């Protein structure tokens, strides 16, 4: 590692202090180190020329960092200051000790599939297309009005069904332990490229989750007289008018997580992490 960036979640009181400790620890050992919060204006430009990112926070912090870093294939070391920590691997107490293993190149790269979501409120002008990338999931849900909405679903151009539902989740394997799991979706092996599709509280319509191959393109269309919200990893939320269509497919980007545990550690820790949720 020649240039390391440290990104901390400014909403966690202890995160900056830990970031400063890591900065001091790394300075004599790497060529260049910087420390920024998630809201730093120069964050995106600093990341472009960085070899490795240290993310300090929880899984939510890594979700934000992943969306910024994925175009440059920059690996992320996750330090957990949150609760469950499916994405983060080491905790604050052991961070300085275990960072030495990364410096000694004893880590491996865990590649995670991401999703690409695209929509256009003005179909006549393709330049209005908006594209977002998600590590966990893309969700279309109802607004604050407590009523079901109708969402039509097609897969690779073939109509599947029209859900009467609170919403529809399209999830990666990484996201299968997040919002999808809360809606009784299956847990998928985290390195799997498959895509998960499931409705949220469906009424008198298809209720079973579907596991789709990685090459699938899913279109979610809000029917007439309904409005919805497009949510990217639960962090970016956009109002959708009626007739909106969102196209979701596998992203050309992946999230690269640096790991020091074995590839099978996911199974070893799964039950404990689920108890913590």
Image: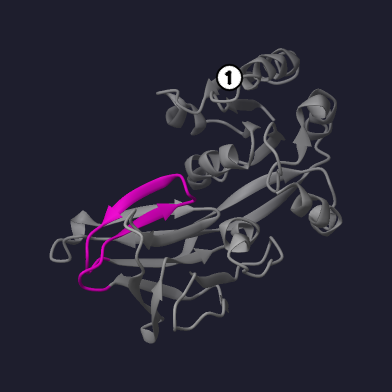
Q: Quadrant of the N terminus?
A: top right
The image quadrant that residue 52 belongs to is: top right
Horizontal side of residue 16 vs 227, given as left or right:
right
Q: Position of residue 115 (x, y in %)?
A: 48, 60
Q: Position of residue 100 (x, y in %)?
A: 83, 28
Q: Is residue 29 above or below residue 118?
A: above
Question: For this rendering, which residue is in front, 113 or 58?
Answer: 58
Q: Residue at x 71, y 15 (%)?
A: 21
Extreme residue in the left direction: 124
Q: Is residue 231 magenta?
A: yes
Q: Is residue 239 above or below residue 76?
A: below
Query: Which residue lies under the disc numbered 1?
Result: 34
Please state the total of marks drawn on the protein image.
1
Q: Is residue 234 above or below residue 251?
A: above
Span of residues in magenta: 223-244
Horizontal side of residue 95 vs 88, given as left or right:
right
Q: Position of residue 73 (x, y in %)?
A: 56, 46
Horizontal side of residue 48 vs 23, given as left or right:
left
Q: Is residue 23 above or below residue 123?
A: above
Question: For this rendering, which residue is in front, 245 or 1?
Answer: 245
Q: Is residue 220 magenta?
A: no
Q: Residue at x 19, y 56 (%)?
A: 127
Q: Position of residue 113 (x, y in %)?
A: 58, 59
State the SS at label 1. strand
């Amino acid at each position: 590692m020649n240039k390391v960036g440290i990104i901390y979640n400014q909403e966690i009181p202890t995160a900056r202090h830990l970031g400063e400790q890591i900065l001091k620890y790394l300075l004599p050992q790497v060529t260049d180190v910087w420390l920024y919060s998630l809201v730093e204006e120069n964050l995106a430009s600093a990341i472009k020329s960085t070899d490795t990112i240290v993310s300090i926070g929880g899984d939510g912090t890594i979700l934000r960092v992943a969306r910024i870093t994925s175009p440059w294939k920059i690996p992320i070391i996750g330090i957990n200051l949150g609760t469950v920590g499916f994405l983060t691997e080491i905790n604050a107490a052991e961070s300085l000790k275990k960072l030495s293993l990364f410096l000694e190149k004893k880590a491996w790269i865990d590649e995670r599939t991401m999703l690409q979501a695209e929509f256009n409120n003005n179909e006549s002008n393709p330049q209005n297309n908006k594209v977002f990338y998600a590590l966990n999931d893309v969700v279309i849900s109802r607004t604050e009005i407590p009523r079901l909405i109708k969402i039509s679903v097609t897969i690779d151009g073939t109509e599947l069904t029209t859900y009467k539902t609170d919403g529809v989740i399209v999830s990666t394997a990484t996201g299968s332990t997040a919002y999808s799991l809360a809606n009784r979706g299956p847990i998928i092996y985290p390195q799997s490229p498959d895509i998960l599709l499931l409705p949220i509280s469906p009424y008198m319509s298809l209720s079973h989750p579907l596991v789709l191959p990685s090459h699938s393109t899913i279109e979610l269309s809000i029917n007439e007289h309904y409005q919805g919200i497009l949510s990217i990893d639960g962090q970016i939320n956009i109002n959708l008018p009626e007739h909106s269509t969102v196209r979701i497919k596998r992203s050309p980007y992946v999230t690269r997580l640096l790991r020091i545990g074995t590839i099978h550690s996911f199974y070893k820790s799964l039950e404990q992490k689920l108890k913590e949720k």
